[in-house]
């Protein structure tokens, strides 16, 4: 067996249906007496539901979380936190709201309880991306890893079908890259394969029947595993490309992941044969890249970067940015190959 190093991440996970009912006891277990509940404006109703559950342990809500964790939003939330004398945060929502909780934890050291409602996986990672004056920087520190995560399947039943598919493929992307990561290890690879399989079998069902509780439960379980992969090992080409496309061309996060993934996998296929056979096995297909493309199509996700706002003229600059700084990838980063990959993703061609 290949030698490896494994770091277990210290977080407590509660998983099931109706688990939101446990939020007060879990806040107490963290030693908090007065917590601020965070959400986006769109999820203010769910934040109020959490505040109700918390009773005296809830200070108030801050429904101002925004995409890409802008520093100004964090500062505004910090002022509210201080004025209320809050001693912890509860974040309910997707990666944007969880990012705000992490940014507050970084600045205050306060404990976080997170209730994820998408499949993006941020709750399981010690990673924080923040935006200041239009520039997004990412850091990795255990200080931002949430102490407690409550997965409540019921809260995901209303995740719109379109977002469910793209958010699920965003999660799969973490597991795919974990399988060929330079610092991969047998435990994380097991989680990755299981995470891909759980999402691959549930996402098509969710697309046709979004309130199917079994499929929603499988998808959230898969998202947990995939998030743990992202938090544990390094990512490579696929995440770098999506970071470039999101950061420099303002493309939407989950859709970009969904479209780029089959092409990044096709690019790496020959350099990572074992990962490819594990991905294909988890998907129940012959070929990893084509299987991911077909899964995206089956859930009705967008398949072409041109359909989500990329201009053909942007491909040259995207290639330049994505190949400017060296980073590890199973296959060398070759500008011609990356340009071809982006052209295929732009047009939405099925990898063969
Ligand atoms: P998001 O948090 O931006 O949510 C998108 C929208 O969907 C928001 O309006 C949100 O309120 C709404 N929403 C969320 N759950 C819902 C539900 N169940 N029902 C109805 N509406 C719901 O989207 P996301 O894809 O979860 O997160 C993307 C962001 O997270 C990006 O900025 C990305 O960089 C970051 N992220 C960070 C990490 C990390 O480890 N640091 C990991 C993954 C994603």
Image (cartoon, rainbow, N blue to C red):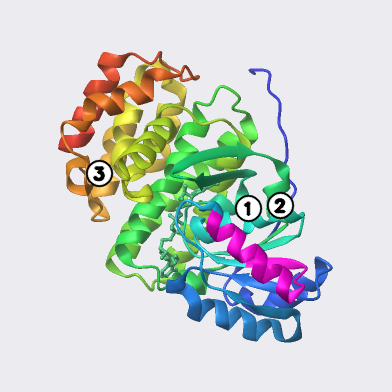
Q: Is residue 132 in sight in this rendering? A: yes
Classed neighbour count for the residue bearing mark 2: other residues with Cα under 10 Å, few (<14), some (14–19), many (≥20)? few
- In the image, farthest residue toward the right: 31
Label drawn at residue 103: 1
Residue 202 inside the magenta-drawn segment? no
Q: Quadrant of the N terminus?
A: top right
Residue 88 placement, left or right of 182: right
What residue is drawn where x is 75% and y is 80%? 57
What residue is drawn where x is 55% and y is 47%? 227
SS at mark 3 in the image: helix
Q: Is residue 351 in sight in this rendering? A: no
Q: Classify 327 as above or below 153.
A: above
Question: Which of the two discs, 3 and 1, labels the residue nearer the N terminus?
Answer: 1
SS at mark 2 in the image: helix
* Mark in front: 3 vs 1: 1
Q: How many marks?
A: 3
Is there a contact, CB below 8 Å, between mark 1 and mark 2? Answer: yes
Residue 327 placement, left or right of 315: right
The residues tagged by marks 1 and 2 sit, at their Cα atoms, a distance apart of: 7 Å
Residue 244 placement, left or right of 90: left
Classed neighbour count for the residue bearing mark 3: other residues with Cα under 10 Å, few (<14), some (14–19), many (≥20)? some
The residue pinned by badge 3 equals: 294
Say which of 99 and 340 sits in front: 99
SS at mark 1 in the image: helix
Label drawn at residue 107: 2
Q: Quadrant of ligand 1?
A: bottom left
Q: Position of residue 203 (x, y in %)?
A: 36, 57
**Residue span colored magenta:** 72-90
What residue is drawn where x is 26% and y is 35%? 290
Q: Classify 53 as above or below 291.
A: below
Tell me where residue 73 sits by quadrant.
bottom right
What residue is drawn where x is 47% and y is 60%? 66
């Amino acid at each position: 067996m290949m030698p490896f190093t494994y770091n277990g991440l210290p977080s407590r996970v509660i998983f099931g249906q109706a688990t939101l009912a446990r939020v007060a006891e879990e806040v107490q277990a963290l030693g908090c007496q007065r917590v601020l509940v965070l959400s986006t404006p769109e999820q203010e109703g769910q934040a109020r539901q959490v505040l109700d559950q918390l009773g005296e342990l809830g200070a108030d809500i801050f429904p101002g979380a925004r995409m890409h964790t802008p520093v100004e939003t964090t500062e505004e939330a910090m002022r509210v936190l201080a004025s209320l004398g809050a001693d912890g945060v509860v974040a309910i929502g997707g990666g944007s709201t969880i990012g705000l909780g992490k940014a507050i934890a970084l600045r205050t050291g306060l404990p976080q309880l997170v209730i994820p409602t998408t499949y993006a996986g941020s709750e399981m990672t010690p990673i924080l991306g923040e935006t200041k004056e239009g520039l997004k920087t990412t850091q990795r520190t255990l200080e931002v890893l949430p102490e407690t995560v409550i997965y409540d399947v019921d809260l995901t039943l209303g995740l719109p079908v379109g977002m469910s598919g793209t958010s699920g493929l965003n999660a799969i992307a973490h597991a795919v890259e974990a399988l060929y990561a330079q610092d991969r290890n047998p435990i994380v690879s097991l989680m990755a394969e299981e995470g891909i399989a759980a999402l691959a079998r549930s996402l098509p069902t969710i697309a046709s029947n979004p309130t199917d509780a079994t499929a929603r439960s499988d998808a959230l379980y898969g998202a947990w595993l995939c998030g743990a992969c992202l938090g544990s090992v390094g990512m490579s080409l696929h995440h770098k490309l999506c970071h470039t496309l999101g950061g420099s061309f303002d493309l939407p996060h989950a859709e970009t992941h969904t479209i780029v993934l089959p092409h990044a996998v096709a690019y790496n296929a020959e350099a990572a044969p074992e990962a490819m056979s594990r991905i294909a096995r988890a998907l129940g297909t012959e070929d990893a890249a084509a299987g991911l493309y077909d899964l995206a199509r089956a859930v009705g996700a967008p398949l072409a970067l041109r359909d989500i706002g990329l201009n053909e003229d942007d491909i040259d600059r995207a290639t330049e940015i994505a190949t400017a700084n060296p980073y590890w990838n199973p296959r060398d980063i070759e500008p011609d190959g990356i340009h071809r990959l982006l052209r295929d993703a732009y047009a939405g061609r099925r990898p063969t």
